[in-house]
Image (cartoon, rainbow, N blue to C red):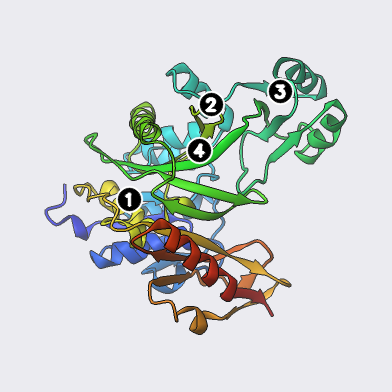
Amino acid sequence: MFEDPTKQKIGIIGGGQLGKMMILEAKKMNFYISILDPTPNCPAHSIADDHIVADFDNEQAIRELADKSDVLTYEFEHIGVEALKKLEGEGYKIYPTVKSLEIIKNKYHQKKLLAKNNIPIPDFISVSNIDDIKSAGKEFSYPMMLKSCTGGYDGKGNAVINNLDEIKSAYESLGAGEFELMVERFVPFSKEISILACRVIDGEIAVYPVAENEHQDSILIETKVPAEILESLKEDAVKLAYQVMEVFEGVGIFCIEMFVTEDEELLINEIAPRPHNSGHYSIEGCITSQFEQHIRAITGLPLGSTSLLRPIVMRNILGEGEQGKAIVYGIKEAFEESDLKVHIYGKEISKPQRKMGHLTVTADRIEDALEKALQASKIIKINGE
């Protein structure tokens, strides 16, 4: 136990935008931060105290990071768990725990645990070949979702199968059996929502307001808070968030993504054991951001208030044009809107559809925030040169 908790050294696996925003909050409390990332000039490089340049599956490098840190965390879940298991077994502190990471990173195992605990989810089944997928089609009918159990994000690793004739191409697009697969019943949802929840080591849980999300091409484009759904659904979403945190015994920030069905019911879609894109609104929108809350939780500090300060809209800034050196256009003109905040992640290379930054707008009315955020998103562009 540290007499001064801020003397703890934090190690982060990953130096992307999530790691960078964790560090920005941690530095307000003067924590020493080391990162592991294979990209020399990754977004978090310029503000980390130490940067181990190595691949994420380099066990020796992960051990080096652990030796330099009092607590380890990570900015994404698609990392090998074996090295972390060894370290945790030797007494190193890793949050969220390796147990929760191992289950959540595999969508099939994640859904099995949720189902076992009577948490509402879409029907699902494990498949390993084309015949299995055909059988799933008979059980679930069409359309249905074919998913990679590991590694997918921003729509990658998913394929919608609309009829029997599309099974072969969907199967081949997801590796033709090279990776573990599952089929999920298609959910005709009316809205997609998400909710952040944070748990500390002693079990205290803090839950954030419900966010409403809009995706384009399976990539999150807009989050608005508060969500425009029934109050009863908001209450149900909060209850589900508490249940999920207890099931996974999570430590740190988690994001629970949900569908609102056409029948006004909630189904859990996916869970991320880390800060999440749909939670970026909390930086300007809440008393305690998701990043500060995560740092508090993993270092044993009490959790902060999750209260919403004002209605807020977040929009992602995606790369446009050709791939190349990232150039930001229009930021001066966009800042004519005084309620606008802009976050540029510092990725050296812009690619079409790559998340290069985000913006937020707060207002007294969510309608005003939506309009101002949309206008700002038309002005700010990040292109490759």
The amino acid marked with disc number 1 is: His
Does the residue at mark 3 contact the one at mark 4 (Cβ under 8 Å)?
no
- The residue indicated by pointer 2 is 263
Does the residue at mark 3 contact the one at mark 1 (Cβ under 8 Å)?
no
Picture layout, residue 156 above or below residue 363: above
- The residue indicated by pointer 1 is 294
Real-space Cα distance between discs 4 and 2? 42 Å
The residue at the point 88 percent across, 29 percent down is 165
Asked which secondary structure carries label 3, the reply is strand
Asked which secondary structure carries label 4, the reply is helix
| Residue 151, image x, y percentages | 61, 42
Nearer the observer, disc 4 or disc 2? 2
Earlier in the chain: of badge 2 and badge 1, it is 2
Real-space Cα distance between discs 3 and 4? 25 Å
- The residue indicated by pointer 4 is 82
Real-space Cα distance between discs 3 and 2? 28 Å
Which image quadrant is residue 262 in? Answer: top right
The amino acid marked with disc number 4 is: Glu
Real-space Cα distance between discs 3 and 1? 36 Å
Earlier in the chain: of badge 3 and badge 1, it is 3
- Label drawn at residue 63: none
Earlier in the chain: of badge 4 and badge 2, it is 4
The residue at the point 31 percent across, 63 percent down is 25
Earlier in the chain: of badge 3 and badge 4, it is 4
Q: Quick one: which residue is furthest to the left in this view?
A: 3
Asked which secondary structure carries label 1, the reply is helix
87 or 29, nearer to the observer: 29
Asked which secondary structure carries label 2, the reply is loop
Nearer the observer, disc 3 or disc 4? 3
Examine the rendering and report whether any part of residue 39 can be seen.
yes
Examine the rendering and report whether any part of residue 62 can be seen.
no
- The residue indicated by pointer 3 is 127
